[in-house]
Amino acid sequence: MSAAAAPIRIDFVSDVSCPWCAVGLKSLEQAIDRLGDAVQVDVHFQPFELNPAMAAEGEDIDEHIAKKYGSTPQQLEQNREAIRARGAALGFTFGARQRIYNTFDAHRLLHWAGLQSPQLERALKHALLRAYFTDGEDVSAHDTLVRIATEVGLDAQRAQQILASDEYADDVREQERYFTERGIHSVPAIIINERHLISGGQPPEVFENALRQIAAKAS
């Protein structure tokens, strides 16, 4: 009897204020669901900050995007509509958002959740994406972060302790540095078995085909 193949490692590098990261995650998960038992995967969420220098109070999102990318109001609306349509096709709702926020503390909580279990980290990741993109919440506010953490089953008091300190700050910065030093400068970046890179919010078929091919070569 041959030994079972090792699970395929997937590093999902992303930010909770990145709309294409929400699209990419839903797309990847649909691909994994389609594969069923044919391919075993082990997903690790990795931090990336689109705006690491952003002030705690955040910025008006239209002003921020116009300044950062030179987008016109018409381009902004076209991009939003494209993202809304992609999200809807994957079962993710993009609502109205007025501001964009600093996400470093959200990443610290995700790191902590990952130390508890992959299931809690994934649940928190989804909850943060919904809070920001669907409900337009401030995902830099500590009371909001504690509430979201509690809703997915994490300890509220422990979450408050972490946010009130610098706990896990060095860990998150080290993870961010690790991936930027390896050429990751935009997200989502989906790294398979630490060798194969898929960038952006690709359709489920792209992830499914890549995982099937990599699994076939491994066997």
Image (cartoon, rainbow, N blue to C red):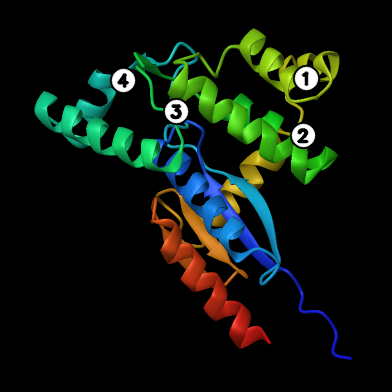
- How many angstroms separate mark 2 from mark 4 (CA)? 28 Å
- In the structure shown, which secondary structural element does the residue marked by tag 4 occupy? helix
Residue toward you, 15 or 78: 78
Residue 195 place in picture, x, y as percent: 56, 73
Q: Residue 119: x, y in percent?
A: 76, 41
Cα separation between marks 1 and 2: 9 Å
Disc 1 marks which residue? 159
User: Mark 3 near mark 2, Cβ–Cβ under 8 Å?
Assistant: no
Q: Residue drawn 13% across and 33% down? A: 75
Image quarter where the C terminus lies is bottom right
| Residue appearing at x 58%, y 27% in the figure | 128
Tag 1–tag 3 contact (CB < 8 Å): no
Separation of residues labelled 3 and 2 (CA atoms): 22 Å
Q: Quadrant of the N terminus?
A: bottom right
Q: Are marks 1 and 4 in contact (CB under 8 Å)?
A: no
Cβ–Cβ below 8 Å for labels 1 and 2?
yes
* Number of the front mark, 3 or 2: 2
The answer to whether residue 117 is visible is: yes
Give the residue type at disc 2: Trp
Identify the mark at residue 53; answer none if there is no mark. 3
Is residue 103 in sight in this rendering? no
Marks 1/3: CA distance?
23 Å
Give the amino acid at mark 1: Ala
Q: Secondary structure at mark 1?
A: helix
Q: Secondary structure at mark 3?
A: loop
Looking at the image, which is closer to me, 94 or 124?
Answer: 94
* Residue type of the residue flagged with mark 4: Ile
